[in-house]
Each structure stands twice: as structure tokens, then as C-alpha cells.
Image: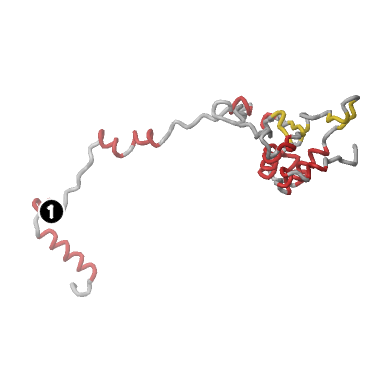
Amino acid sequence: MAKAMFVDRRMHRSSAFRKLTASSIFILLEFYSRRQVAKIPRRGYQIRNNGEILFTYAEAQNKFGISRSTFRRAIDQLVNLGFIDIAHHGGGMMKDSSKYGISERWRDYGREEYIKRSRKKDTRKLGFTTKNWEDRTGRKRRPKSKIGINNDTNSSITNDTRDHQTAVTPSITNATHKTDPNYYIHKGLEVLKAMHSTQYH
């Protein structure tokens, strides 16, 4: 592995490079270090693995301590300013890594001829959904319980009253029409005697 890394002097002096954050610069230099440069007859030095360069989110986080959100923002900035291109959009859940290529679009940044690119929206639906969960995980879903609030109400008090007669306790007002008023007086005296037995014996 080569210990030296060639960087075009015009690149770090360009207006596009001056817009890069510190994280984006570090990640760009890491992409440059992963190039496989070879001298091609009559064509000069060329990148043999351009469009095949790998740099995963997991590696950025585990090896360099770069969070996924920081890495994502840096990739977006490097693409927007013309330093790298995404040759293949990978899907982490499918163990399919993205592949990158070194770009020189930055040379025309700020001019009319600049070719602007950005990360393409992933429409492959590689994540988990209710329809593909079993296929993606290889596991069966547990059946949902059929007993819910709505079913429980079938045996609620409201429905029970349809089949059962509820006993109505007569109120004091209704009871006094059929009961001797002296009954309550006698009962009151019994209670007083029990509470103050010494006065009534």
C-alpha cells in the first residue's frame, strides 16, 4: 500500500473546497487514500477502482468515530460540490454497500457548465414493512389477540342488563308509605340504648 497520497493543488485552493466542513475534508482524503492509481500507456495515471471505492457507515463509525448523521451530511456535501459521485446506492439491511467514484466536477463549481448532482432518493423500499417483514426476517409474526375492548363490551354491564332484571331497591320515601313510622323511632331508641347502656338500665 502506497504511503504517499497525491492531491491536486488546484483542488484545495478551489471555491468548492473552501466550502467543505472539517468532517467532509477528512472523509474526502480517506476516499483519496482508497484510490488504486495506475499508469496507463498513452493515458497517464488513471484510477483503476473508480466507481468501486467502498467506505461504509459502519466503518466510519467504528474505525474513525464518525456518527452516521455526520457521515451522511459529509457524503451529501462532497457529492453536491463535485468531489465524489455515488456509483451504486447500497442498502445496509441487504448487506449491499454503496460504491463511490472520485469526481472532478469541482473544477467547474460556480460556473454555468457545472454539473450539479445530489444523492438520489432511494425508492427501492429496502426497509421493513408489514408486508415484507416475514420475508426479510425469516420469522413468522405472532397472531394478534382477538380479544379487544370492543369484544369485551359484549359482556359488559350494559349488555348484561338486556338479559337480566336489575333489582330496584325501594327508597326511604317509597318505604315510608308502606312502613309504620313508629318503626324508625323504635329502631332509633335501640341504637341509643346500645350506645348508652348505663342510662337506660
Indicate whether 197 appears above or below 70. below
Q: Residue at x 75, y 37 (%)?
A: 107
Q: Dividing the image into 4 quarters, which one contains the N terminus? A: top right
Residue 3 is left or right of residue 73, and the answer is: right
Name the residue beneath numbered marker 1. Answer: 173
Residue 135 is left or right of residue 11, and the answer is: left
- Given residues 126 and 162, the one toward you in this image is 126
Q: How is the image coloured?
A: secondary structure
Q: Residue at x 19, y 47 (%)?
A: 169
Residue 77 is left or right of residue 184, and the answer is: right
Indicate whether 23 appears above or below 46. below
User: Can you give x and y, in whole percent of width and height, for residue 67 in the image?
Assistant: 69, 45
Three-letter amino acid code of the residue under disc 1: Thr
Query: Can you name the residue that lies furthest to the bottom here?
Result: 199
User: Can you give x and y, in whole percent of width and height, for residue 109 in the image?
Assistant: 70, 38
Q: Residue at x 83, y 34 (%)?
A: 35
Callout 1: SS: helix
**Which quadrant holds residue 30?**
top right
- Given residues 187 and 8, the one toward you in this image is 8
**Which quadrant holds residue 100?**
top right
Q: Dividing the image into 4 quarters, which one contains the C terminus? A: bottom left
- Given residues 109 and 137, the one toward you in this image is 109
User: Can you give x and y, in whole percent of width and height, for residue 11 in the image?
Assistant: 78, 42
